[in-house]
Amino acid sequence: MPPVKSKKGKGKGKGKRKSKDSSKLKVARTRSAPPPLPPELRGLDTEWWYTFLHKHAESGQVIPSDEGEAFRHFFRTSRKTFDYICSIVREDLISRPPSGLINIEGRLLSVEKQVAIAMRRLASGDSQVSVGAAFGVGQSTVSQVTWRFIESMEERAQYHLTWPGQERIEEIKATLEAVYGLPNCCGAVDATHIIMTLPAVESSEDWCDPAKNYSMFLQGIVDDEMRFIDIVTGWPGSMTFSRLMKCSGFFKLCEAGNRLNGPVKVSAENAEIREYIAGDSCYPLLPWLMTPYEGKNLSVPMLNFNARQKAAGLLGTNALTRLKGSWRILHKVMWRPDKNKLPSIILVCCLLHNILIDCKDELLPTVELPNHHDIGYSEENCEQVDPNGKAMRENITAHLQSYEAPKLLC
């Protein structure tokens, strides 16, 4: 049994410039000094940041000249959001710190520096040796700090990845109908492979995917803002997308009528349209999972449905692309990870992805995102068609003929 990590959400709530002159950075620091911290954040350690920043400036790396942008360049978040993340894990990192957390100068690491080490490891995907050198700590310290951060985030930040309450679901449906014309659509689903190398003794065909990589699957369901509202991971990359879906807790909830079970919409043709999500043709067509029409010589209404359905489905694709581009530890080939710990790493990266959205942090335009989250993989096609799913798709297709979306498709 793989180490499955499923987050279903049970809550009811809701241009670059290269500079080697460190003196220029000192001037920029003075001119764009951060505003005074509120009382609850005063006393936070910031020395590590300026030491880290100058070390990278002196190495000749291309760093944004604005200090705030430089911080986001390295850690993906604004300083305000970073401080918020520190507040989530502070109690754990203080009360149960990993052993031996002493830097080269013989001082204990502050909570801020521990969080920075962990987030830099996740954001860059660089080796533990490289990350340690940037912070003046050893490889083992990076390993301990990162895992302790992951454990704490997994336990304390779960409220950032929950299935929405019905009020929020109604907002999602309204937005997706306004933008794509799809009635009662609650989000989109997609999945990606997290590639890794395995020791010879652990190598198995179970983990060897269609692209001949060893990988672990991540399936994510996202809302209108590309926020993850359900994930499942831990399963081998050798599985098909459809089998992964059927192994998920989300599938079981939907099949039991306990998810996507909100108000039914009645179309102009007096047909019922239930809640559903949009997915690619690699998924089965189900009453609560709409996939595009396949084949040649499709009618104009079918093509119209496909255009809208695929545009909405890109929310899932783009969310996974942003996830892997932001937290590059998931995009690079992971060197012999512990398969029991990898699902937790994936989950925490999804939590960080959501925290950026919840805190209204925008990625820097200079953060390079991959063209696709699963480069090198061929498209799968699932031919399973549920009769009730087919009828649902026909109802939506007919509805779209008599309904004009108020916004043009991108």
Image: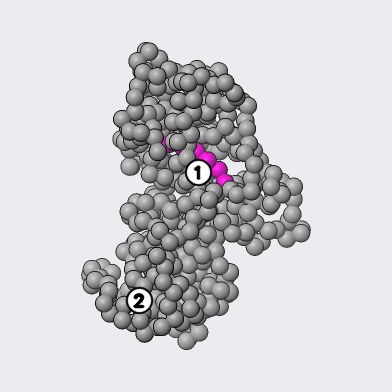
User: The magenta stretch spans which residues?
Assistant: 187-192
- Would you say residue 395 is visible in this rendering? yes
Residue, x 29% and y 75% (percent of image)? 43
Q: Quadrant of residue 338?
A: bottom right
Q: Is residue 217 above or below residue 48?
A: above
Magenta-span inclusion, residue 100: no
Give the mark, 1 or 2, whose residue is nearer the N terminus: 2
Q: Is residue 280 left or right of residue 175?
A: right
Return the residue found at the far top.
270
Q: Is residue 85 above or below residue 389?
A: below
Q: Position of residue 386 (x, y in %)?
A: 57, 21
Q: Is residue 17 above or below residue 311?
A: below
Q: Quadrant of residue 46?
A: bottom left
- Kindly identify the amino acid type of the residue bearing the numbered disc 2: Thr
Q: Which mark is residue 317?
A: 1
Q: Is residue 82 above or below residue 290?
A: below
The foreground one among 148 and 176 is 176
Q: Which mark is residue 46?
A: 2
- Dot in front, 1 or 2: 1
Q: Position of residue 145 (x, y in %)?
A: 50, 69
